[in-house]
Amino acid sequence: MTAPALPLAGIRVLEFCHTIMGPTAGVILADLGADVIKVEPAPVGDKTRRLPGFASGFFVSFNRNKRGICLDLKSEAGRAVAHKLIAQTDMLFENYGPGTMERLGCGYDQVKHLNEGLIYGALKGFLSGPYEHRPALDEVVQFMGGLAYMTGPPGRPLRAGASVIDMMGGTMAVVGALAALEERKRTGKGQYLKSALFESTAWLMTQHMAGEAITKREVPPMPAREGAWAVYEPFETSDGDQIFIGLTSDNHWRRFCTEFERPDLLDDASLESNEARVAARPRILPIVADVVKRYSTAQIVEIAERIGIPFAPVAKTADLFDDPQLAAAGGGLLPIQLQDGTWTKLPRLPIEMGEHDLGLQRQAPQVGEHTLEVMAEAGYSAEEIEESVTAGAVVAA
C-alpha cells in the first residue's frame, strides 16, 4: 500500500539558517513533507557543522530531511542563483544577525518583488522595538527574560538544560508561516513575519507574571517556590537513584497511603485536604522519603504505574536511547548518521498524524550535495551550472 503524501508535500522552503533556531523551523516543515532546501555559505558550508563540545550535535539534530545547496551570496552570480530560487519558493527562513541578509542582497524588501506569494520568515533575537538591533543567544534571553532566575535556586540563576528558547522561537516561526500560508490562499499574497527569542521567553514566563499579579508578591525561583501540592518532588530510592513522585489529588494521596500501608496518614483528619497537606509538608515529606527509600527504583515504578500516581525516574541523556516509549512512539527513534560516518538514534517530531509516517526521508545533506539538482530544477542549463561552479559562485559535492 502506498503511503499517503505528507501534509506539506508540494511546499518549497529556502532555509538561510544556522545553529538551532532557524534549522528547527526547517526540520519541522521538512518532517511534515515540505521540500526544504538548506542554503549554506560557500565554500565550506554552515559553521554549525564544525562546532565542538556541547554544540557538536546541533547540525545532525536539526537538518534531516532537507536538501542542501552551497552559494556564495557575496558574489553577484551567487546572489543571482538565490534570487532565482526565491522567485520559485513558497517560504524563506533566515536567522542571521540583524542586517546580514540585507548586506547579502536577500533582505525582504530586496526580494519581495521577485515573488508576490513569498512568505518570508525572519527569526531574530527580538521583535520590533528598542532591542531589535541587538544580537541575541538562547542564554542571553533566558537571563534577560527571567527564565534563568526562575530555573536556578535563589541567587544562582541557571539556564535550562536544553536549547528550549531556540527551539521555541523556531516553532513559533512555523506557526506563523502556516497561518500565512493559509491566508495566502485567500489573498494570493505572501508576507513578512518575525519570531523572536526574547518574546518566546516572555511567553513562557506568562504563568509567573500572572501569578505575581494575582498574589501581589514576587514569585520565587522554582526550586524555592511554595508548593501547590504536599508531595511533588524527587525522592531517593534504595539503589541510590532518584524518582519524582507527584501526588496532585486526594485520590493520589489515598492510593499512596493505602499501597504503602500508612493508615495513620490516611485516617489523619488534619491531612484530609490538599491545602492541609501542603501546610503539613515539613511533617509529610520525611515520611514519604522514608517509605520510598525502602524500595528500588524498579519497584517504585511498578507500584506507581499500577496504582496510577504520577512518577518519573530521574533520567540522563543516555537513558533516552533505550527508552521503551521512545522506541515505540510513532515508529521509534530515527536512525541518524553522524558526521564521522557512525550511526545513532534520535527523537522524531513529537506528533502523530493519522496514517502519516513523519520519519526519516533523508539524512542531513553534505555541503553542496544537492546544488546541481536544485539548480537544474530552477531552469539552469548544464553549461550555466558548470560556469557557476567554476566561478566559485556555487559549490557542488
Image (cartoon, rainbow, N blue to C red):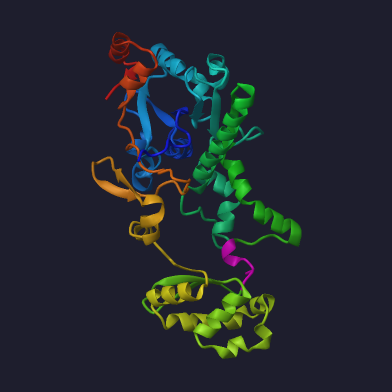
In the rendered image, the vertical position of residue 246 relative to residue 76, given as above or below: below
Q: Residue furthest left?
A: 341
Front one among 134 and 93:
93
Residue 125 shows in this picture:
no
Q: Position of residue 325 (x, y in %)?
A: 40, 59
Residue 341 shows in this picture:
yes
Left or right of 341? Residue 31 is right
Residue occupying image coordinates x 35% and y 45%: 57
The span shown in magenta is 222-229
In the rendered image, the vertical position of residue 29 relative to residue 149, given as above or below: above
In the rendered image, the vertical position of residue 243 relative to residue 270, given as above or below: above
| Magenta segment, prevailing SS (helix, strand or loop) | loop
Q: Position of residue 339 (x, y in %)?
A: 28, 40
Q: Is residue 33 magenta?
A: no
Q: Position of residue 86 (x, y in %)?
A: 48, 19
- The N terminus: image quadrant: top left
